Image (cartoon, rainbow, N blue to C red):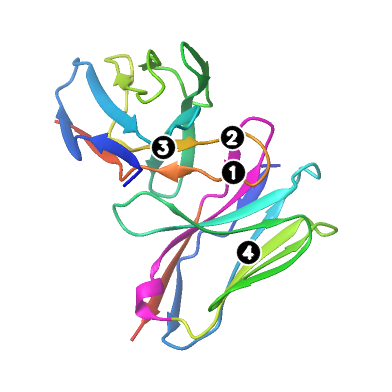
């Protein structure tokens, strides 16, 4: 079983839709969880991070962690074409981040 | 502005050649990382360094080499032993290896074998 599993998609939604992106993980020692956004042919950029279980909101983005289920989510409300990108989840391991493979999202005008 | 600079943006390599990808950061970060990204494969760790003059192999180190002589610089050499080097290469750095320290990524180098 891989440490982090992420559905690669691709995911295509109409503008204004609510998007749900998810990752599962196997290592119960993970405490810090992050979401990165990567536009085509660019490096990933940190979007949000959360510590332990709970929710964190930043504008149209909400990150959710359920440690009991080893499941994290990123919700995007009122999605925009500019949200079209690949979204990678990441979790803090002992010396490095462990990344999911990324989900490619397209928001259609 | 602080950040990570990767150069060149595009690189073409002939079969049997070694090439070196540059990664420079002015963030005063201790740890630096090299990843390879292929379609559908996500980020795969090649090498990382937590301190000057020290580095560790990642998951796919074969055919690659690195050096860390200065805190700001972490060049990656793709040797002729790397059989399938065509990929997008990303360099990253972080201020710490615990807690909520995320990575700052460069804009990548796309390497193509011709």
Name the N-terminal-most of marks 3 and 1: 3
Co-location on one chain, circles 3 and 4: no
In primary-sequence order, the first of circles 2 and 3 is 3
Residue B4: give x, y in percent of width and height.
34, 39
Task: Point out which mark residue B27 bears.
Answer: 3
Mark 4 and mark 2: Cα distance apart in space: 26 Å
Can you tell which of label 4 and label 2 is closer to the viewer?
Answer: 2
Q: Nearer the viewer, mark 3 or mark 1?
A: 3
Specify few, some or many for label 2: CA neighbours under 10 Å numbering under 14, 14-19, or 20 or more.
some
Q: x, y (%) of residue B1?
A: 31, 47
Classify the position of the C terminus of chain B by image quarter: top left
Host chain of mark 2: B
Q: Over which residues does the magenta segment extend?
A: A80-101
Q: Do labels 2 and 3 share a chain?
A: yes
Q: Name the residue under label 2.
A: B96
Q: In this view, does B96 lie to the left or right of B86?
A: right
Chain under callout 3: B
Residue A27 horizontal side relative to residue B75, left or right:
right
- Crowding at dot 4, Cα within 10 Å, few <14 / some 14-19 / many 20+, comes out as many
Q: Is residue A99 magenta?
A: yes
Residue B79: in magenta span: no
Q: Mark 4 points at which residue?
A: A22
Q: Is mark 3 on a helix, strand or loop?
A: loop
Task: Give the residue number, with chain letter if any, for mark 1.
Answer: B101
Instruction: Chain letter for mark 4, please.
Output: A
Of marks 1 and 2, which one's residue comes earlier in the chain?
A: 2
């Amino acid at each position: 079983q891989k440490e982090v599993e992420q559905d690669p998609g691709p995911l295509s939604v109409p503008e204004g839709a609510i998007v749900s992106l998810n990752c599962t993980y196997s290592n119960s020692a993970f405490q810090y969880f992050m979401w990165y956004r990567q536009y085509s042919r660019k490096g990933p950029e940190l979007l949000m991070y959360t510590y332990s279980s709970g929710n964190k909101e930043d504008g149209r983005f909400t990150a959710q962690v359920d440690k009991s289920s080893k499941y994290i989510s990123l919700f995007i409300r009122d999605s925009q074409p500019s949200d079209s990108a690949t979204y990678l989840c990441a979790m803090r391991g002992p010396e490095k981040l462990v990344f999911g493979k990324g989900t490619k999202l397209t928001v259609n005008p | 502005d602080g950040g990570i600079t990767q150069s060149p943006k595009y690189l073409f390599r002939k079969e049997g050649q070694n090439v070196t990808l540059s990664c420079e950061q002015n963030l005063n970060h201790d740890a630096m990382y090299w990843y390879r990204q292929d379609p559908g494969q996500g980020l795969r760790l090649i090498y990382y360094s937590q301190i000057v003059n020290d580095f560790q192999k990642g998951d796919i180190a074969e055919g690659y080499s690195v050096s860390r002589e200065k805190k700001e610089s972490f060049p990656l050499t793709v040797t002729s032993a790397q059989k399938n080097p065509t990929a997008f290469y990303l360099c990253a750095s972080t201020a710490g290896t615990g807690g909520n320290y995320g990575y700052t990524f460069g804009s990548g180098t796309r390497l193509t074998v011709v």
